[in-house]
Every structure is written in structure tokens, then in C-alpha cells.
Image (tube, rainbow, N blue to C red):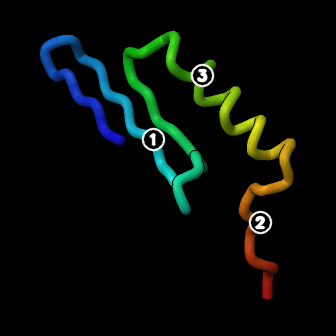
Amino acid sequence: MVEHDPAGRRLEISYHRAGRPVGALTVGRTARPAAYRSALEERLASGTAATAPAAR
């Protein structure tokens, strides 16, 4: 999802994998990070978070 409001100097981008949130970027949207943080914490707590590939 991307929301861009140049006049209001706001930007919001959310990243999803398989329909689930994996990250977010916000600029000028002070209340939004808390909602994304909650969604990401729930995903981590449920054990469905993607794991990083092992270092070689």
C-alpha cells in the first residue's frame, strides 16, 4: 500500500509478503507507526515471521 500526499508532506508505505505485513515506512504520519508496530508484533508473536537466510 502506498499513500502519498505531497501537499501535506506525508508518505506512508507498507510492505507485505503473502498478504501479511513485514514492514512499513511513514513520513509525517505520527500516529501510523504504532498501528504498524502492533501488527508486526502480533505476527512475530504468532511465529509466522519470515526468518532471515543463514549466513554462508
Q: Position of residue 9 (x, y in %)?
A: 24, 17
Q: Secondary structure at mark 1?
A: strand
Judged by depth in the image, the label closer to the viewer, 3 or 2, is 3
Residue highlighted by disc 2:
51
Q: Secondary structure at mark 3?
A: helix
| Location of residue 4 (image quadrant) | top left
Q: Earlier in the sequence, mark 1 or mark 2?
A: 1
Badge 2: residue crowd in 10 Å (few <14, some 14–19, many ≥20): few
- How much space separates mark 1 and mark 3, taking CA atoms? 11 Å
Q: Is residue 47 above or below residue 8?
A: below
Say left or right for 56 vs 34.
right
Amino acid type of the residue that numbered disc 1 sits on in the rendered structure = Ser
- How much space separates mark 1 and mark 2, taking CA atoms? 19 Å
Q: Are marks 3 and 2 in contact (CB under 8 Å)?
A: no
Image quadrant in which the N terminus is located: top left
Q: Earlier in the sequence, mark 3 or mark 2?
A: 3
Q: Residue at x 45, y 41 (%)?
A: 14
Q: Residue at x 51, y 52 (%)?
A: 16
Q: Looking at this view, is 27 or 24 the one in front?
A: 24
Q: Position of residue 15 (x, y in %)?
A: 48, 49
Q: How many marks?
A: 3
Amino acid type of the residue that numbered disc 2 sits on in the rendered structure = Thr
Q: Position of residue 6 (x, y in %)?
A: 16, 22
Residue highlighted by disc 1:
14
Q: Secondary structure at mark 2?
A: loop
Amino acid type of the residue that numbered disc 3 sits on in the rendered structure = Ala
Q: Is residue 45 above or below residue 31?
A: below
Q: Is residue 49 above or below residue 40?
A: below
Image quadrant in which the C terminus is located: bottom right
Residue highlighted by disc 3:
35
Say left or right for 26 vs 31.
left
